[in-house]
Structures are given as C-alpha cells and as structure tokens.
Amino acid sequence: MNLKYNQEYPDSKRMKIRASIYCRVSTAAQAEPNRISIPEQVRHCKNLIHDRGWDLVYTYIDPGYSSSTLNRPGLQQMLKQLDAFHVLVVHDPDRLSRDNALVEATIYNELDAHRVQMTSITQPIHIVDPIQYDPRENDTVFIQRKISGLSGGLDNRRRRRRLIAGIDARERSGYCCKPRAYGYTAEWKQRIVDGKMVIEKATIVVDADAVIVRRIFNDFIGGKSALSIARGLNADRVPSKKRTLWTGSVILEILQNPVYTGKVRKNFTPVINGKKVRKPKHEWIIVDGKHPPIVSFDVYQCAQQVLDRRAKRRRAVSSTRLLSGLVKCGYCGWSMAMEGAYKEGRGRYICNKWKNSRLCDRNPIQIGKVEKGVLHEISRLSDDTGLLQEVERMSRGGEEDALKNELSRLTIKFQQYPSRQRNLFELVETQAISKQVFLARKGEQDEEIDDLKRRIDQCQKQLVVIAGTSTDVQTISKALNEFVQNYDKYDIISIKQNLFDLIDSIEVKNDQFYLKYRFSSVDCVVASKDATHKSTA
C-alpha cells in the first residue's frame, strides 16, 4: 500500500515537505458511532507522514469540540501557524468541518490563502510540490474537497437519523435510553438469549437514592409542599442528582415522572425546530419499561391526585396572607417568602431565592408596612381623579414608547437583510456553499423577512390604536372606589381576588416597594421607612 501511494504521488518527493496533524473528537459520543479516539487518529496520521518521508511540525488537538464551530483552541492555533507547514493531515475531512458550509469555507479559504494542502487517512488527496502548488489552478483538489464534504455531511445525517430511530425503537420497547432519572443508573449485564450470551446496558435502582424518592412521594401525599420537601432535603444535606440544592421544581418533576412506577415516558420534551418543547401530560406516550419500579402505581396515582387538587386553585389566592403571590424581589424577580409571625403584620417578607439558596440578597421589608402602604395607595388613587388620569396618561405613553422602541428594533433588523442576502449570493457564486444549502438558507431568510414584515405591520397598527384611544378613567375609578368602600364587607378571599384584578405585582427593593397596576405600566413607590407615598413616574 505504501509503495502504491509513493508511486501515485511522485511530485511529493521534489522537496522536503513539512506537515502538521489536526485531530478532534466530539463530546456527543452517541452521535459518532464510528468514532475513533484521538490517540488512534494521531497514530494513523504519524504513520502516513513517516511513510511519505515528510517532517512532522505540529500536532493540533481539539478534544470535545463540535465541528460546527470555529471556536476551537487547536483549530485557532493551527490557523495562526499556517505559514509554518505545507500539508495538513487529518484522519477524515469531517474532523475539520462537517455539515456547516460557512465553517468549512472559512477553513479552506485560510488553507488556500497560505497555500497549505490537505490530505486524510480515509480520503487521501493528491499532494503536489509546494513550490508548484496553486489552489486557484488545482481543480482536482477543489472537486475532491467538495465530494468529501458532501459525503461526510450525508453520512452524518444518516447516522443521526439511524440513531434517533434506534432510540425511539428501544424506548418503545421499554428501555430507558436517555439520561437516567434520579434513583436509577446504568449497568452492563449479561443474559442468555436463544442460547447465546448477550451483553446489554440495563437500568438498575440506586438503593440510597430510591429511599429519597420514596420519602418525597410519602411526604407529598402526607401533606407537605414540594418546596418544604426540598428544604428538608437541603437541611439533611441530601445531594440532588446534579449535586446542587434541591428546589420545588425538581421535586415536582420527580412526582410527575411515571418512570418510578416502571414505565417509560416518551413525547415529553421533543425537539421541535432545534428547541425542546414540553408537552402537556395528555400528549405523553407511556409504555411498560424493563426497569424495576421504585414506588407502586397506587402511590404514584395518589400523588397525581394531590397535584391535580392543588392545581385547581391558586395557592396565593387561597392563602390568608393579604399580598401573597403579588410581592416580588426587585433583585431577582422571585416571589417573596414570609419570615416570622404573620399576626398583625409583624413578620417580614424576604427573598425566597435567598431563603432557599442564598444566591440573592435577603431584601427584607416589614409585612404590615407593605400592606398598609398598598391599601393607602389604592385609596389615594381612588380619591384623586386627576392623579388617576395622570397615571393612565403616563401608562399609555409608556406603552407607546415601548412599541416605538420595538418598531425601531424590528426596522433596523429588517434593513440588514439586503446585505445578508448579498453575502449569501456571494457564497454560492464563489462556490463556498452548494446550491442546495443556498436554497435552504434563502428560504429561511425569506421566512424571516415575512415574519419581520408582519411584526412591523402589527406594531404600526397598535400605535395607531393607542394614538386614537385611551383607557376609560371612569371605569378604573369606579373599580377602585368599589373596592375601597366595600373593603370591610369582603372576606379575605374576595379582597385578594380584587387585589389580583387591580395589581400586577409589588416589587420590593432597598426597603421600598414599587406598585404596578394592571391598567398601568407606572411604578408607584412607597418608602417603608416613613410610609411616604410618591410616584416615580
């Protein structure tokens, strides 16, 4: 084989050729079933360089980097040192780039600009004397590059489709293929099938984690909330799957996952247009799994009934605390939690994120002062029609400014498309991308342009509506007066429902709160230190 290669490329003997090696592997091992390790790539490339009699100059390695990006340390270093060698050796052309025409064009343009040739183990390309090599005159190299790039891209697409189809088939057969849920792990096992020894990866229970899963289900059915369960696990120093703090959302995910009853859940978060989309429960596909359950189906169903029962009514509205569900932390946006006794408003609101993880500011404010300040502000607004008109006018102005800013942003983005389209045409004219890639990207750009036109037209129509109409101040005033006059007659649930109708949120920051009405984008500030009321609008 070596003799044949030397006879095929006699021109490579005219001068001493300096060669470098580039190797890469991706972190997505499942996407590369035929992958070869970096040491093996280096070994094969060194053998080729030795057999050709070339001098090895550099070896560039990118472990765990995708071929779809130029942000690879080894690649960037190689591009800076292209003047130091004549030939770049790779195991396969897809180690440089695969299925990304722009990345491929950039790399090959740099190689051509420095008169560097490239060859590979799997797809050898003819190497000529560096003195005679001119990439603009060598059509054979250009054709071979395009063919190898097209072949690598098609192979990658086929592997991906086969991989997805294989995962889907295994999941429908009851195997857990995705990262195992908390409480499970994967282990290689041997078994006899039709008289033959078969080795397969099985999903088994982690006993220590299974105890925590059963504790979560039992505590939830026993009346504890997801948040209180998370706090209990954090207090007991129980590590989560990612070795971070437990949160209420993680507890809820465990409670809703049927994998703990020995089932496999499909169509939960399918990838649509490159993004994961969470599907509602009635669209899940549940199949019998081959892994052992951790909790019984009856326990799981009981937990789902508790979840459904609690979801029917908003917890914040049903709470006896006047402003629960409305008060937010001004630093992180999380809800505020109560600290201390609620009786007579003597407790304090503190940031719930700080309470759970200490990742925010404590941000305390006295509950009684906030409640009194909010009720006073509503009363003041209901008595002063002029102030209410000013709030409404400024609200309308704020909405108008927001729409104008959005319209300006969309217009600037729309004006960039002629330049982007010219660049796309230049790429296909210079054969940096194929006609198929050009048509696909042009179609995407046309869709984006149509979407921008639609959104620009929508903003313009909304501005016309705002300019010609205004909020009915009398209706707002009537609603405020009715709430103030009947406050003593309402029960706590009715009061809170009215507050939810009037107020969008109450933001707490620096011992002050900022009141945002549902009919206004204006922030009305109350300083809790001296209960002074003022408008920041």
Image (cartoon, helix red, strand yellow):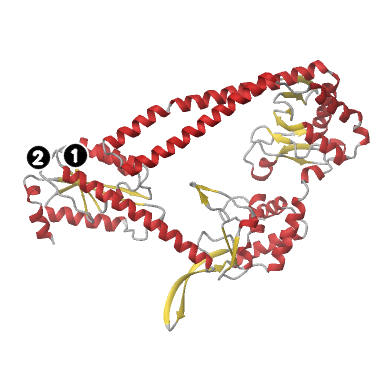
Mark 1 to mark 2 CA distance (whole Å): 17 Å
Of labels 1 and 2, the one closer to you: 2
Classify residue 417 as left or right of residue 80.
right
Residue 460: quadrant of the picture: top right
> Is 43 located above or below residue 428 in the figure?
below
Disc 1 marks a residue whose amino acid type is: Ala
User: In front here: 163 or 23?
Assistant: 163
Residue count near mark 1 (Cα–Cα under 10 Å), binned few <14, some 14–19, many ≥20:
some
Q: Which residue, given by chain and number where applicable, does mark 1 sit on?
A: 84
Q: Which badge, 1 or 2, is on the more N-terminal residue?
A: 1
Say which amino acid is labelled 2. Gln
Mark 2 is surrounded, within 10 Å at the Cα level, by few (under 14), some (14 to 19) or many (20 or more) other residues, namely few
Q: Find disc 2 in the rendering and name its residue.
A: 132
Could you tell me residue 145's position as x and y percent?
Answer: 23, 47
Could you say where residue 322 lies in the image, as x and y percent from the top left?
82, 37
Which is more toward the observer, 339 or 134?
Answer: 134
Q: Secondary structure at mark 2?
A: loop
